Amino acid sequence: MAQPRKRAPRKRASKVTYSPDVLRLALDAAITAAGLPPARKEFQFARAAIGRQWRLDLSWPEVKICLEIEGGTHIAGGGAHQRAGRGGRYLSDMEKYNQLALWGWLLVRVTYEMIADGRALAWLEEAFASRAAERLAQPERPARLEEQAG
């Protein structure tokens, strides 16, 4: 009886990794190349309204779109969900994301891998298209009474 052939061990595809700084620069360049407006970096919001000093990684306040880059998603034992053990960061992020939603912001959450493979840019383009469609669908607002009286 013939011996079954032993399979050679599978080679893992070599995964090219880039530093977070390089990926952020690449995303900035991709945003510009896609014709999207430049993002505001580390935009602080909620300070005046509720006294919080939250910052957004990238934001477009004029259209209420923001992008948050989630680090630590490949940490053994839970990744991003493990942040609860690191000073309650996970809970603080939940508060921030909920407040953004309540104030009408469109939040795009990504990892560095999603920046590298192009998904982050695709979602941003979709977010801008969604906002543009919303604006077209809204009925025109009547002029203010002061403007009508003059």
Image (cartoon, rainbow, N blue to C red):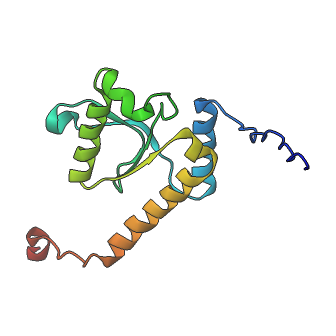
Quarter of the figure with residue 34: bottom right
**How far from the left and from the top, in percent, is residue 60?**
40, 50
* Image location (x, y in percent) of residue 119: 56, 54
In-front residue for pair 92/84: 84
Up/down of 92 relative to 127, above or below? above
* The furthest residue to the right: 2
**Residue at left offset 39%, top offset 73%:** 133
Residue that appears at 34% across and 71% down:
134
Residue 116, compared with residue 54, is above or below; it is below
Query: 47 or 147, which is in the foreground?
Result: 47
**In the picture shown, does residue 139 fall above or below 70?**
below
Residue at 18% x, 35% y is 48
Q: Nearer the viewer, residue 63 or 85?
A: 85
Give x and y (percent) for residue 25.
61, 38
What is the quadrant of residue 104 in the picture? bottom left
Give the position of the C terminus as an image quadrant. bottom left
For this orientation, the residue located farthest to the front is 1
Q: Position of residue 86 (x, y in %)?
A: 34, 21
Is residue 65 toward the left or the right of residue 34 in the image? left
Left or right: 56, with 34 as reference point: left
Residue at (28% x, 25% y) in the render: 88
Asked if residue 20 lies left or right of residue 84, the reply is: right
Number of numbered discs visible in the structure rendering? 0
